[in-house]
Amino acid sequence: APGSSPPGAASSSLPASSPAQPASDADLCARLVSSWSRAVLDGDTYGDYQSMGLSHGQYEILRDVVAAARAVRERQGARAAGQLIDRRARHACTERYRHGTPSGGPWA
């Protein structure tokens, strides 16, 4: 019929999508540490690292990030503290996973 498209024509006009890249260990660490740091800073929670789904090393990063964020929040407010959390978590997690996954077991 005039003006009709051949079967499958609609799907061929869609852009080809590439498979999603899995998040790196450093990205996952930064997301987890940032999220939990905000919760801890807001006083919503503070549990052991295993209940948060963190390794011991990630929990050490969280403790450092939260301590720094508390000081910044006192001086500069919540927004500055949130920005610091993101920066510090990203930097520390990138350093932690720079050479791959740290050895010492899954909770290291």
Image (cartoon, rainbow, N blue to C red):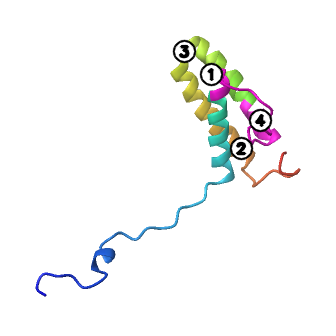
The amino acid on which the numbered mark 4 sits, given as a three-letter code, is Tyr
- Of the numbered discs 4 and 3, the one sitting upstream in the chain is 4
- The vertical placement of 77 against 13, above or below, is above
Residue farthest along the left direction in this orientation: 2
Q: In the drawing, what numbered circle is on residue 95?
A: 2
Q: In the drawing, what numbered circle is on residue 81?
A: none
- Neighbourhood count class around disc 1 (C-alpha, 10 Å): few under 14, some 14–19, many 20 upward: few
> 29 or 5, which is in the foreground?
5
Residue span colored magenta: 39-62
* Residue at x-position 61% and y-position 12%: 74
State the residue position of label 4: 59
Mark 3 vs mark 2, CA separation in Å? 27 Å
Secondary structure beneath dot 2 equals: helix
Mark 1 vs mark 3, CA separation in Å? 15 Å
- Neighbourhood count class around disc 2 (C-alpha, 10 Å): few under 14, some 14–19, many 20 upward: few
* Residue at x-position 52% and y-position 66%: 19
Q: In the drawing, what numbered circle is on residue 42?
A: 1
The amino acid on which the numbered mark 3 sits, given as a three-letter code, is Gln
Mark 2 vs mark 1, CA separation in Å? 26 Å
Nearest to viewer (mark 4 / mark 3): 4
- Neighbourhood count class around disc 3 (C-alpha, 10 Å): few under 14, some 14–19, many 20 upward: few
Q: Residue 54 in magenta?
A: yes
- Of the numbered discs 2 and 4, the one sitting upstream in the chain is 4
Mark 2 vs mark 4, CA separation in Å? 14 Å
Nearest to viewer (mark 2 / mark 1): 1
The amino acid on which the numbered mark 1 sits, given as a three-letter code, is Asp
Secondary structure beneath dot 4 equals: helix
Nearest to viewer (mark 1 / mark 3): 1
Secondary structure beneath dot 1 equals: loop
Drawn side of residue 5 relative to residue 93, left or right:
left
The reply to whether the C-beta atoms of the residues labelled 3 and 2 are less than 8 Å apart is no
